[in-house]
Image (cartoon, rainbow, N blue to C red):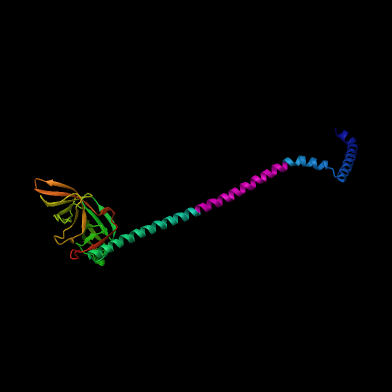
Amino acid sequence: MRNLWRDNRFRVIALLAVLALFVGIQHNRAVQRGATNPFAEAVMALVAPVQSALRSTGDFLSDFGYGVVHGRRLREENERLRQEMEALRAEQVAQEELRQENERLRRLLQFAQTKKIRPLVARVLAIQPSAYFHTLIVGCGQAEGVRPRMVAVTDKGLVGLVYMVTRHTAHVLLITDPNASVGARVQRAESRAVGVCRGRGEDYLVLTFLSKDADVRPGDVVITSGLGGVYPAGIPIGVVEQVMEQRQAGMREARIKPFVDVTRVEEVLLTRAEATPQ
């Protein structure tokens, strides 16, 4: 085989040269006539699929790269917007809390002015309702002028009585405590019945020591009577829900729903009995 190639290689080369010359002449003539270049067509026919594949691959890679970069930017933008929304929401919550606090304090001060009470406002630090004691702790003490037996109220009514004081805190016995009692009066002009409101460790009070013919009805408003010299007169306590007959004792009792939900108090106004409201 090698000998055959060696013997005929010059003939093959010469033949290829002649063919090349012929093809070149044909190519020149075609160009001069403005005809299509057969070689260009052949090359394009061979290269076109490859070019198309390369173009598609390039487009895909370009789109993929744009999607990766753009997607990352979108995620970063979404995260930034989420953080801004959370910050705005937190600010709105803080502003609403401040608005509510200002409204509560405004009502307390108005109540103090109406009742001629020296405005000593104390913030509630803790509420401690238990089976034995219902108390709360406020953030004012001896240094701020708080003394034992001061009365705690809100703009809605009676909360309780200060029973222990430290330098910067005070403990208030709530009216719902089983050990709490306060002289009370029915506000209705036709009645003015008096008795004693006692705590029951529940969310209601009991108005006791009413005479058997006391004019007490459901819906009556009960206020402090001022009798006993501990609580100022005229502070709202609650409303009568039910009247019960105590036949053995020859007296009546009434179940009272307090005006103040002591578990939701946030600020209280402290006063003394000698600052008797009008």
For residue 102, say whether it is visible: yes
Q: Is residue 12 magenta?
A: no
The quadrant of the picture occupied by the N terminus is top right
- Which residue is nearer to you in this view: 70 or 101? 101
Q: Is residue 74 left or right of residue 247?
A: right
Quick check: 86 left or right of 63?
left
Indicate whether 43 appears above or below 159.
above
Could one spot residue 139 in this view of the protein?
Answer: no
Q: Quadrant of residue 52?
A: top right
Q: Is residue 45 left or right of residue 129?
A: right
Give the residue drawn at x 58%, y 48%. 68
Which residue range is magenta in the image? 50-79
Image coordinates for residue 121, horizontal then vertical, percent: 27, 63
**Residue depicted at x 64% and y 45%:** 60
The image position of residue 271, as x and y in percent, is: 22, 63
Residue 59 in magenta?
Answer: yes
Front residue (pair 167, 246): 246
Q: Is residue 264 above or below residue 110?
A: above
Give the residue displayed 33% in from the left and 61% down from the top.
102
Q: Is residue 180 above or below residue 168?
A: above
